[in-house]
Image (tube, rainbow, N blue to C red):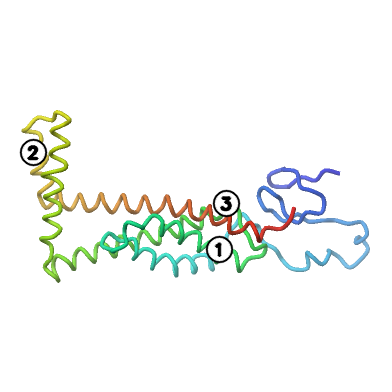
């Protein structure tokens, strides 16, 4: 007799413990056990839905790993160029650590992506906070704001002005845009845009890392079906 999953209605092989698509535990009824002592031994312990997440340990793991990763990914970090790779590996690591404490010891790709999203949010907040504190300290505590000002002015005067000129923008418009971007408000807007781009990229790669972690790290723990 063909068995189907009660959630996604996909075919489940006879004797399988879990749905091969959504991971829902499949309860098995045997006529031999109808008058016996109840369920088979393999159901003697509670199992969870592999498509759901126990958020208490999940958040604890995500927080413990995402905060250091956020510091590494901040704008002023010396290894900031590796931020996206670090974020992908961090989310996959969180998913791997989470699966070790679960039964069954694997989760679906969707659940891994959700855990990766939470990890990315925590890491993004940490990266923004660390970047803001670092920039404030560099300008007002260590009096090295001139370094950032020179970098910004060089980028505006050389790179952007040349691009605008090659695009045929008139001189008056270029001058107005240049004055606006070199003003304090323009510098602040530039920093906010950079932080927004950083957080968005971290979230995207974090979700991808969580999904990949659930797909590949859980393969050897997935029950045979």
User: Is there CB contact under 8 Å for labels 3 and 1?
Assistant: no
Q: Establish if 125 lies above or below 4.
A: below
The spot of residue 111 in percent (x, y) is 56, 54
- Which image quarter holds the N terminus? top right
Q: CA distance from mark 1 to mark 2?
A: 52 Å
User: Mark number for residue 176?
Assistant: 2
Q: Establish if 161 lies above or below 111.
A: above
The spot of residue 163 in percent (x, y) is 17, 36
User: Mark number for residue 96?
Assistant: 1
The spot of residue 189 in percent (x, y) is 20, 49
Query: Residue beneath label 3, please?
Result: 109
Task: Name the residue located 10 percent from the left edge and 48 percent from the top edge.
Answer: 182
* Viewer-proximal residue among 15 and 166: 166
Q: Secondary structure at mark 2?
A: helix
185 vs 219, left or right, is left
Q: Nearer the viewer, mark 3 or mark 1?
A: 1
């Amino acid at each position: 007799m063909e068995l189907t999953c009660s959630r996604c209605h996909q075919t489940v092989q006879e004797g399988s413990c879990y749905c091969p698509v959504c991971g829902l535990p499949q309860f098995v009824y045997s006529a031999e056990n109808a008058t016996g002592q109840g369920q088979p031994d393999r159901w003697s312990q509670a199992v969870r839905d592999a498509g759901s997440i126990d958020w208490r340990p999940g958040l604890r793991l995500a927080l413990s790993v995402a905060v250091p990763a956020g510091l590494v990914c901040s704008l002023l970090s010396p290894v900031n160029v590796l931020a996206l790779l670090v974020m992908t590996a961090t989310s996959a690591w969180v998913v791997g650590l989470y699966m070790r404490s679960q039964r069954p010891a694997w989760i679906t790709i969707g659940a891994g992506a959700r855990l990766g999203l939470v990890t990315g949010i925590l890491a993004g907040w940490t990266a923004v906070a660390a970047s803001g504190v670092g920039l404030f300290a560099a300008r007002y505590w260590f009096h090295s704001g001139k370094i950032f000002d020179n970098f910004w002015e060089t980028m505006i005067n050389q790179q952007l002005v040349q691009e605008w000129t090659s695009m045929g923008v008139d001189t008056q418009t270029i001058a107005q845009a240049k004055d606006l971007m070199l003003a304090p408000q323009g510098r602040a807007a530039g920093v906010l845009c950079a932080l927004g781009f950083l957080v968005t990229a971290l979230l995207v790669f974090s979700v991808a890392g969580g999904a990949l972690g659930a797909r590949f790290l859980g393969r050897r723990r997935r029950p045979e079906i």
